[in-house]
Structure formats: C-alpha cells, structure tokens
Amino acid sequence: MKPETNIILIGAGNVATQLGLALSDAGYKISQVYSKTKSSSSVLAKKLKTESITDLKKLAQDASIYIIAVKDDAIRDVAAQLKLGNKIVVHTSGSVSINALKKVSTNYGVIYPLQTFTKGKSLNFKNVPLCIEGSNKSTSTTLQYFAKSVSSNVQQVDSDQRKVIHLAAVFACNFSNHMYTIAEEIMKKNKLSFGLLKPLIEETASKIKNNSPTEAQTGPAARGDKKVMKEHLKMLKNKDIKEIYKTLSNQIMKTASANKPA
Amino acid sequence: MKPETNIILIGAGNVATQLGLALSDAGYKISQVYSKTKSSSSVLAKKLKTESITDLKKLAQDASIYIIAVKDDAIRDVAAQLKLGNKIVVHTSGSVSINALKKVSTNYGVIYPLQTFTKGKSLNFKNVPLCIEGSNKSTSTTLQYFAKSVSSNVQQVDSDQRKVIHLAAVFACNFSNHMYTIAEEIMKKNKLSFGLLKPLIEETASKIKNNSPTEAQTGPAARGDKKVMKEHLKMLKNKDIKEIYKTLSNQIMKTASANKPA
C-alpha cells in the first residue's frame, strides 16, 4: 500500500499529531488534516506539509484511509457527517465501539494507540502498542499491515477487549498519575521539591518491566505497619486524600494477605 | 574519611544490600554484617567479602559508622541493645525520628535513601536521593561527605520533613504501584497480557520528568467524560475496585476544575 496510500486525518489533537508524524516519517502521504478549530488544523497541517480544512464537506473522497482521531464523544457526530463508500475509515478510541463507524463505509475499523500523548513531548512511536480491529477480514489485514509500518507492537483486539484494556489503562496511567499529583501537593505544601521524588517514580515504573506489580509492592500497607499508617493519616489534613490513603492501604493489605504463601 | 572508614551494617535486607554494595564499590571497608537471620546475614556478608554475625554482642566496637538498616519497627529494639560511645550511628528509615538513636551514641543521624529497592534488581545508586540528618553539626558534616561519596543527590532534611517526604513517597511509589496491580488484575481476568500496558506505564512516569503531574493528567475523569466513567463502573464487578475508581475519578475531576484557567 505504501507509498501510494493517501491518508486523511480527521482531528488535530495529541493522538492525531503523533500518529500523523509517525505516518509521515514512515513515508505515507497525509493529504488533508481536518479540525473544526482552524488554528489546530493549520498547525498540524503545516507540520505534515499538507492541506488544512475546517469543513467536513471539503474532505477529499480519494484517500485510502481516513483516521478519525477526535475526542470520544465527538466520534459519532463526525461519523454522522461522513459517507465514504468502501474507503477504510478508523477511529482511535479505546472506549468507543467499532460500530460507531458502521454507516460511514463498508470497510471500517479501529486503531487504538495504547499510550498517553502529551502536547510537545515526542516519543518513539515504534514502541506504542496499536490495538486494531477491522469490520471484515480484508480490512483487518490491511490495518494490520498499515499499523505494522509505524509500530512494532500491533495486536488484533475486539471492541470488548479494547474496552477492558482502556479500563485497565485508566488505572495504569490516569490513576497512577493522580498519585503523583497528590505526592506533588504534599511536597509543595511543605515547601519541599517534587523533584526529589522523581527517581523513585521512575524506578517504581521500571520495576514492573520484570516483576509483577503484586510482587513489587512495598511500603507500610504491604508490610502491615499500622503505626506508620496511623501517623500518615494524622498528617493528612485534606479529608479526600485521607480517604484515598485509607482505601488504598486497606486494598494493599487485602492483596498482600491474599498473596501470602500459606 | 576514605578508605580508612570502617563500616558495620546492621541489617541485611534490600536497603542494607544496595547501600552495602554501593559503599563497597566506593572503596569503603564493610567490616561486619549483622542480621538476626543467619542466612540473610551470610548471603550479604559473602557479597561484601566480610564477616557475618547474628548476635549484636559480637558487634565490633572499632568501626567509624554503624548503619542500622532494619525494618522501621525493629529500629528501637536494635538501638536499645547498642552502646557506641561517640561512634557515628545512623538509621535509614523515612518514618522513624532521629531521636530513636539518642541513647546509642553522642553522634547519631539518619541516611534515608528515597528509593524502592527490589531483591535481585540492581540500580545505579548514584541517582538515589539520600536525605540525611545529623544530631550535631560535625555529624551532619561527616554524613554529608559520606553520603556524597555514593550518591550525587544528597539533601539535608530534618525529621519532620523526612516524614512528609515518606508520606509523599507512599503515594508516588506504593500507591501508584497498586494502580499497576489493579490494572494487571483487570487484564488477567480477561485473558489479556499485562505486558501490553508496560509502554504506557513507562511513558506516564517519564512524562513527569518535565511536566507537573497536574498538567499531565489525562483520561475520562480529567475531561469529565461521564459516559465513559459510568461504563467503566458497570464493568467493574469488585466492589473495592469500584470504590477506588469512583473516589479517584471524583478527586481528579475536583483537581481539574480547580486548575482550570478562569
């Protein structure tokens, strides 16, 4: 399919940007970038040296693959405005069913990049797991081939599995990041530098490369140190944070006792 | 002080092991390793090519620095059995006050390595922040010099500050690791590989090197996507995990709205 494959990007946020750059690096031609916001669309179009549009009616009909990388709750709106015959159209969401695109084309699917993308922070797209799903055999095969040209980690995953992965990702990414946020608040409130904790955060994430996180668990709750936990609860003045400390410590103690060798 | 400085390690767990190896690499002589468990003590003593003891009465009295690296709740027990005159004695705990060592020597202190140590996983000790505290000026100066010979990140921190850092570390390390545990359980229960989430976990931790975690927050709660959160709660059957999902999502929504530009 490469390099004659023309791609159109619908969306110009973090996912569209990183995916667009990776595709462009891999030699694909991005023929248009759409965003309802002119500034977003033109910033990305400039990066990809392509045309920027803000009206879906101006969408070229001759691309091979249309990638809808907009916010989850905007996918159905965008899909309702598209009729693409038998062109391949995919969305990139973890939580939206493949069926959201059923009326857009006979060949539709999903390419869900299992990664957190930050504005201005580039990453090696080759390492981003891509969870793909096609509405039929030939679309799946095309998407598999297509995804493999930008990532070395491509998985066929159905919509139910993808929802589970997305849920697990909320814990692995969004909730662990919130733990960093609370740690930062505690440090700041006491005029201590959050930077001091960065090697610890890095090592905690690095540990699970070769250890199950259940086995890697350390800390007062894991060793059932009630004295320290009681002191920590006394130190926490914010009642929400106190509640989080209690709930998570209890849960860690439960997990630890369930996994203790008999 | 180097290399004539003789060090005795009291404790043979993960902290004692990593610290002992780092000190040995830096050219210090470890003259004894104590553990009440013979196997632990002799394993570490062998690594450090030194004497292993299991009775505190056999502790040599001629070392320059005694490092008590035992579990938090064992520090006072060990301290009660030691009389070390004016030799420097330190513990390595984040949550125990420097005063636990008051009766052991006139020169006491703390070297708290702000890191999570795993059996069998080595790490570059140079990057481990060492929070130090001395009972007097000269002890502080000696500990500062001593700590700097194994780590490039040495901070003078008093007992109250150290307790705050330890509390923040519980969120940054122990609780974020528990988020990984829950993610692993969700994946396993659905016969999906936890490995798929590893690049995401790595990137989430890597992001905060240059971004505040408050700004780096993504996910359904951060964008107030109630539809997805409702679906996730429906998917979670375990009532504890459901509760954690709810509590953390609410907290993320609160933080997000507090940090929204007016």
Image: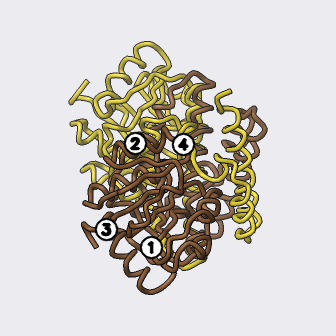
Chain colours: A brown, B yellow
Q: Quadrant of the N terminus of chain B?
A: top left
Q: CA distance from mark 4 to mark 2?
A: 21 Å
Q: Are marks 1 and 4 in contact (CB under 8 Å)?
A: no
Residue at numbered disc 1: A88
Q: Which residue is mark 4?
A: A37
Q: Which label belongs to residue A121?
A: 2
Q: Are marks 4 and 2 on the same chain?
A: yes
| Labels 3 & 4 near each other (Cβ < 8 A) | no
| Residue A67 place in picture, x, y as percent | 46, 63
For this rendering, which residue is in front, A192 or B13? A192
Residue toward you, B111 or A247:
A247
State the residue in front, A197 or B147: A197
> In the rendered view, does A193 fall on the left or right side of A188?
left
Q: Which residue sits at x=50%, y=41%? A: A38
Residue indicated by mark 3: A5
Q: Nearer the viewer, mark 1 or mark 2?
A: 1
Give the chain letter at badge 4.
A
CA gap between label 1 and label 2 equals 29 Å
Give whichever of discs 1 and 2 has the lower sequence position: 1
What x and y, as percent, mark residue A100?
62, 70
Q: CA distance from mark 3 to mark 1?
A: 11 Å
Q: Which chain letter goes with mark 2? A: A
**Residue A68, position in %: x, y?**
51, 61
Taking the spot 56% from the left edge, 33% from the top edge, the residue there is: B165
Which label's residue is closer to the chain start, 4 or 2?
A: 4
How far apart in space, not on screen, are marks 3 and 4 (Cα)?
Answer: 26 Å
User: Where residue A240 sits in the image (x, y, percent)?
Assistant: 76, 41
Q: Quadrant of residue B196?
A: bottom left
Q: Do discs 1 and 4 share a chain?
A: yes
Give the residue at x 41% y 60%. A8
Instruction: Specify the amino acid type for callout 4.
Output: Thr
Q: Is residue A32 above or below residue A199?
A: below
